[in-house]
Image: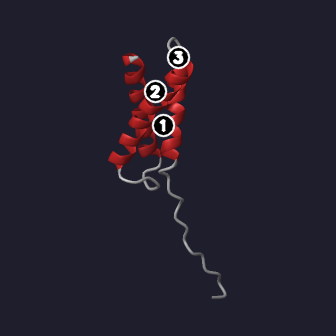
Amino acid sequence: MFLEALGSALLGFALAWAAVHRLPDRLPVRAIVLVTGTLGGVFGALVTHGALGPGHLLATLIGAVAVAAVLLSLLVRPASRRLRRSAAV
């Protein structure tokens, strides 16, 4: 269980780090995103491990990444829209 938790935390952190570098203008402060990804991975591993039981390492890590991705997607803000004015105005 310890290796599942550590692996899921590292996967969640890596996913959050990739999101910070890919979408820096659409996410809040970097520290919040990194903590959310890490804790989302650990929580996802806990839920998946509780649902499947021991002995499903790969499925637990997949569940951890899925939950971390969902939580990170909740932090993404919409792209800024500039007002385009027509030539007539």
**Residue bearing the label numbered 3:** 53
Looking at the image, tell me whether mark 2 or mark 3 is earlier in sequence order. Answer: 2
Q: Are marks 3 and 1 in contact (CB under 8 Å)?
A: no
Q: Quadrant of residue 81?
A: bottom right
**Residue bearing the label numbered 2:** 46
Q: Residue furthest left?
A: 31
Near-viewer residue (48 or 65): 48
Name the residue located 42 percent from the left edge and 45 percent from the top edge. Answer: 20
Percent of width and height locating residue 37: 42, 38
Q: Residue furthest bottom?
A: 89
Name the residue located 40 percent from the left edge and 39 percent from the top edge. Answer: 17
Q: CA distance from mark 2 to mark 3?
A: 10 Å
> Label 2 is placed on what type of residue?
Leu
Q: CA distance from mark 3 to mark 1?
A: 20 Å
Name the residue located 57 percent from the left edge and 75 percent from the top edge. Answer: 83
Q: Secondary structure at mark 3?
A: loop
User: What sort of colour scheme is used for the picture?
Assistant: secondary structure
Looking at the image, tell me whether mark 1 or mark 2 is earlier in sequence order. Answer: 2
Give residue 29's mark. none
Near-viewer residue (20 or 61): 61
Q: Secondary structure at mark 1?
A: helix
Give residue 68's mark. 1
Name the residue located 42 percent from the left edge and 19 percent from the top edge. Answer: 4
> Label 3 is placed on what type of residue?
Gly
